[in-house]
């Protein structure tokens, strides 16, 4: 029986196979309980780089669907009791898979302590402190443009410094884990309507709001960590904003139109912040 399926939406990132190798090397689950599903979003990588391992499966999408569509495709063929999603430029701590599958609540989303990765040296950037929790804010971007945004919540991290798992309000979409039952009942699939969020933006906010709607929580565990490529290094998985910057702003506006009232009237009052 597969315990954990890790979905990696991929688009021409040379670090995909380093990420897969990190997942394999850091795994504690028995071999038959882990599957890693790399979704090639309308491209083929160099054949000589492909890792041949019974725990790794590859899916090729005939055309580029964007990150949301690639995640949905990976989840649709996954078999694990738990589902995780990883960016294609991440390094993982030892025993990450056992920690997540033993700690993640049935109706919750879980993420881990987030470090920043130097992808050239393939090591943690030790001069930047890790993130242990994030709060959700509505950020004013100027020119009448607003968006949901996750921000470091260091005051809460300090307050709960001795707690191994703490509840938060936001997360980066780069890595998360949830019970399959929660995905099926609360998420179903990510919205891929091009007139809504667009192909890339807002998946983390969408899932957290849907989780709250069904009585679940967003939990941060310090029992495992991951290191995500720092933003100072170039990205590869296009979100449609390079060709058309308005796509991103339209996604921000749509997300607020759906969730701002719910956030202000139902969720935010539960938090004494």
Image (spheres, rainbow, N blue to C red):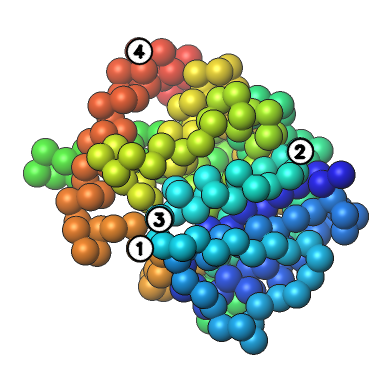
**Would you say the residues marked 2 and 3 are in contact, meaning their CB atoms lie under 8 Å apart?**
no
The residue mark sitting in front, 4 or 2, is 2
**Would you say the residues marked 2 and 1 are in contact, meaning their CB atoms lie under 8 Å apart?**
no
- What residue lies at 30% left-to-right and 18% top-to-bottom? 261
Quadrant of res 105: top right
Quadrant location, the N terminus: top right
**Would you say the residues marked 3 and 1 are in contact, meaning their CB atoms lie under 8 Å apart?**
yes
**Would you say the residues marked 4 and 2 are in contact, meaning their CB atoms lie under 8 Å apart?**
no
- What residue lies at 56% left-to-right and 74% top-to-bottom? 15
Q: Mark 1 sits on what residue?
A: 238
The residue mark sitting in front, 3 or 4, is 3
Q: What element carries label 4?
A: helix
- In the figure, is residue 187 to the left or right of 49? left
Q: Within 10 Å of the Cα at label 2, are there few (<14), some (14-19), or many (20+) other Cα atoms? A: some
The dot on residue 265 is: 4
**Between marks 2 and 3, how big is the CA–CA gap?**
25 Å
Q: Residue furthest left?
A: 143
Q: Residue 155's x, y, as percent?
A: 50, 37
Q: In this view, does 46 lie above or below 86?
A: below
Q: Which residue lies furthest to the front in this view?
A: 62
- What residue lies at 21% left-to-right and 46% top-to-bottom? 249
**Between marks 2 and 1, how big is the CA–CA gap?**
30 Å
**Would you say the residues marked 3 and 4 are in contact, meaning their CB atoms lie under 8 Å apart?**
no
Q: Which of marks 2 and 3 is nearer the N terminus?
A: 3
Q: Mark 3 sits on what residue?
A: 66
Q: Is mark 3 on a helix, strand or loop?
A: loop
Q: Which of marks 2 and 1 is nearer the N terminus?
A: 2
**Between marks 1 and 4, how big is the CA–CA gap?**
34 Å
Quadrant location, the C terminus: top left
Q: Within 10 Å of the Cα at label 3, are there few (<14), some (14-19), or many (20+) other Cα atoms? A: many
Q: Earlier in the sequence, mark 4 or mark 2?
A: 2
The dot on residue 81 is: 2
């Amino acid at each position: 029986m597969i315990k954990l399926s890790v979905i990696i939406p991929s688009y021409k990132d040379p670090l995909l196979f380093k990420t897969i190798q990190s997942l394999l090397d850091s795994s504690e689950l028995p071999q038959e309980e882990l599957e890693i599903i790399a979704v090639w979003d309308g491209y083929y990588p160099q054949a000589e780089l492909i890792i041949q391992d019974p725990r790794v499966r590859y899916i090729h999408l005939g055309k580029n669907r964007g990150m949301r569509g690639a995640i949905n495709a990976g989840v649709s063929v996954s078999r694990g009791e738990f589902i995780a999603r990883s960016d294609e430029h991440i390094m993982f701590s030892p025993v990450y898979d056992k920690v997540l599958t033993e700690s993640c609540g049935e109706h919750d989303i879980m993420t881990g302590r987030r470090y920043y990765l130097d992808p050239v040296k393939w090591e943690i950037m030790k001069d930047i402190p890790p993130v242990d929790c994030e709060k959700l804010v509505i950020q004013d971007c100027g020119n009448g443009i607003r968006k949901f945004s996750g921000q470091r919540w260091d005051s809460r991290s300090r307050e709960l410094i001795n707690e191994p798992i703490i509840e938060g309000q936001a997360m980066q979409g780069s890595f998360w884990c949830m019970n399959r039952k929660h995905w099926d009942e609360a998420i179903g699939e990510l919205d891929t309507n091009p007139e809504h969020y667009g192909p890339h933006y807002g998946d983390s906010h969408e899932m957290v709001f849907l989780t709250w709607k069904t009585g679940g929580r967003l939990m941060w565990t310090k029992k495992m960590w991951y290191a995500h490529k720092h933003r100072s290094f170039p990205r590869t998985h296009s979100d449609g904003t390079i060709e058309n910057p308005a796509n991103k702003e339209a996604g921000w506006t749509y997300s607020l139109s759906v969730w701002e009232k719910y956030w202000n009237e139902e969720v935010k009052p539960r938090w004494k912040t």
